[in-house]
Image: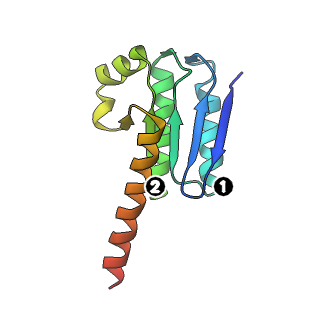
């Protein structure tokens, strides 16, 4: 069973997975969760993986779904607090070139806020 702690802020939603393993047993539930919250209007997700010690390819697939959904919504998907194992898997899969990854939740918040400002400036310049 999937365990998720959600913290809704004005500019972003932080999602902390409470499971130690992000594998085929919960990856489809996580994908569905990302779809649901993006449909609710969330476009910026900070995915806190501090509790996750192990992931497999199906877990990475769920992360990629979250990333794609946020991009399509014009927002950001930021991974943070990866364990050594998960960070290594992400590097081996070369997803570190695709995903936004930072060491801490605080840095993830800063990155989302920076991206929001950048997107607003682009929108303002296109209008003017």
Q: What residue did someone put label 1 on?
A: 40
Decide: few, some or many residues near mark 2? Use Cα within 10 Å; few <14, some 14-19, many ≥20: many
Where the N terminus falls, by quadrant? top right
Question: Where's residue 11, x and y in %?
Answer: 54, 57
> Reading the chain from its start, which is encountered first: label 2 or label 1?
1
Q: Residue at x 59, y 58 (%)?
A: 10
Q: Which one is nearer the viewer's eye here, 105 or 119?
A: 105
Q: What residue did someone put label 2 on?
A: 75
- Do labels 2 and 1 touch, CB within 8 Å? no
Q: Which quadrant would residue 87 be assigned to in this image? A: top left
Classify residue 65 as left or right of residue 100.
right
Q: Residue at x 58, y 26 (%)?
A: 27
Give the answer, above or below, for where 26 lies relative to 13: above
Q: Residue at x 51, y 14 (%)?
A: 53
Q: Which one is nearer the viewer's eye here, 108 or 66?
A: 108
Give the answer, above or below, for where 76 lies relative to 60: below
Q: Residue at x 42, y 19 (%)?
A: 86
């Amino acid at each position: 069973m999937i365990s998720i702690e959600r913290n809704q802020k004005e500019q972003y939603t932080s999602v902390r997975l409470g499971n130690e393993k992000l594998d085929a047993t919960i990856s489809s539930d996580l994908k569905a969760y990302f779809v649901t919250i993006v449909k609710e209007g969330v476009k910026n997700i900070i995915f806190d993986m501090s509790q996750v010690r192990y992931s497999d390819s199906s877990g990475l697939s769920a992360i990629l779904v979250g990333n794609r959904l946020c991009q399509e919504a014009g927002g950001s998907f930021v991974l943070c607090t990866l364990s050594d194992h998960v960070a290594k898997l992400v590097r081996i899969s070369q997803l570190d070139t695709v995903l936004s990854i930072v060491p801490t939740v605080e840095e993830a918040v800063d990155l989302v806020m920076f991206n929001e400002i950048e997107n607003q400036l682009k929108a303002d310049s296109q209008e003017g």
